[in-house]
Amino acid sequence: MAEASKVIHVRNVGHEISENDLLQLFQPFGVITKLVMLRAKNQALLQMQDIPSAINAMQFYTNVQPTIRGRNVYVQFSSHQELTTMDQNAQGRGDEPNRILLVTIHHMLYPITVEVLHQVFSPHGFVEKIVTFQKSAGFQALIQYQGRQNAISARTSLQGRNIYDGCCQLDIQFSNLDELQVHYNNERSRDFTNPNLPTEQKGRSSQHPGYGDAGVGFPQMANAAAIAAAFGGGLPPGISGTNDRCTVLVSNLNPDRIDEDKLFNLFSLYGNIVRIKLLRNKPDHALVQMGDGFQAELAVHFLKGAMLFGKRLEVNFSKHPNITQGTDTHEYMNSNLNRFNRHAAKNYRYCCSPTKMVHLSTLPQDVTEEEIVNHLAEHGTIVNTKLFEMNGKKQALVMFENEEQATEALVSKHATSLGGSIIRISFSQLQTIRENSQ
């Protein structure tokens, strides 16, 4: 390994790869202060704000092969410790004002549509176009103003503000795109200068290939930072990190007892769920489309052979890249029950195969152990329970006789109401309940 530097040297950068693609690859690890494209050599130099960010990125991409648009790129520390502005003037355009804003929305508890964004941004000037897209890092939008001054004023006054009270926080940066391409006017994209655009392309749902294919597998690396943070820069044993298949086939289900929401409760432990389909012609089979290939790989790895409703589950990658939306599919893309929109690193860290012990959180403050036992007892023999407080919030551990009973309790009672609160259940990796433990 060469001497660590803030500057990262990227090779095999094909002409189809844009500055934006490179920024997306490294942004999860920290702020990128400079980017120089060496087009003639198919290379790029990129400077992170500090050495630890660069080391994090390099450690992560030592374990996971970085790819952009299907092409492998190769990264190493640069021999430069610093990029001079002379190099940079050739290309650089990180925070240079532009009439197009890239907006990320954090803590998105309510769905955000083109209309909502238009209401928020139009007081600062004429908004020409809006494109929205869902990434595993969260919900993002590109907003194009008529003039650059409008975009500067919007960013100055809206940066860090919440759209709704206490949630949907705006994180705004200047995009380095020159013009947004909008093909459809619907709730995901809008061209306010051309009201006559169709709402859908005939025969397929509206995706913008240029903007990270909204519904079809989020870019693998958008969650790179969360993965790196969760697993200390490495990956859990048995996980390659290179799978790009998002859809999982589950078979040997118990058709009398399973439904889409129960599958959601189990698979959402390992990633965000886009949609689920029970196969009518094979009632013990289902397809589950995860947010990206890494999340699908975690689900296959940790759920293979799990027992549920008296059956041993078979979990494999499907040959279908995604599930086509239809009358027989259940949509979860915008469900606020998806666990990985917030605290992704913490959720990755808690991924494990089913255990005998479940952890309950978001409980009502006045809940009793008896109420918890009554809520879960129909699913098996409860061996031990413990109610405790963390950061002023009530949580509980419940230990069942075996993993299958705990799994049944989780799939049946996650996201149900107890004493007026929607409770959250996950598997705990603790082996026993210590009486004095917090």
Image (tube, helix red, strand yellow):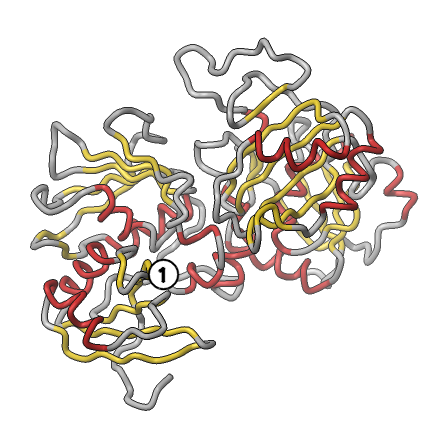
Q: Which kind of residue does numbered mark 1 sit on?
A: Cys
Front-lying residue, 377 or 47: 377
Image coordinates of residue 202 in percent, x first then y, are 43, 10
Residue extending farthest right:
86
All told, the count of numbered labels is 1
Q: Is residue 374 above or below residue 82?
A: below
Image coordinates of residue 131 in percent, x first then y, are 60, 28
Q: Is residue 65 visible?
A: no
Q: Is residue 182 above or below residue 13?
A: above
Front-lying residue, 214 or 237: 214
What residue appears at the point 55 percent right and 18 percent down from the top-left corner?
A: 185
Image coordinates of residue 186 in percent, x first then y, are 51, 21
Q: Is residue 116 above or below residue 349?
A: above
Neighbourhood count class around disc 1 (C-alpha, 10 Å): few under 14, some 14–19, many 20 upward: many
Name the residue tied to disc 1.
351
Q: Is residue 226 left or right of residue 33?
A: left
Q: Is residue 206 left or right of residue 302?
A: right
Q: Is residue 50 above or below residue 208?
A: below
What residue appears at the point 36 percent right and 46 percent down from the top-left corner?
A: 296
Front-lying residue, 171 or 285: 171
Image coordinates of residue 124 in percent, x first then y, are 76, 34
Name which quarter of the figure residue 255 lies in.
top left
Q: Is residue 242 visible?
A: yes
Q: Is residue 388 left or right of residue 313?
A: right
Residue extending farthest bottom:
436
Front-lying residue, 426 or 318: 426
What residue appears at the point 7 percent right and 43 percent down from the top-left corner?
A: 256
Q: Quadrant of the N terminus?
A: bottom right
Secondary structure category for the residue under label 1: loop
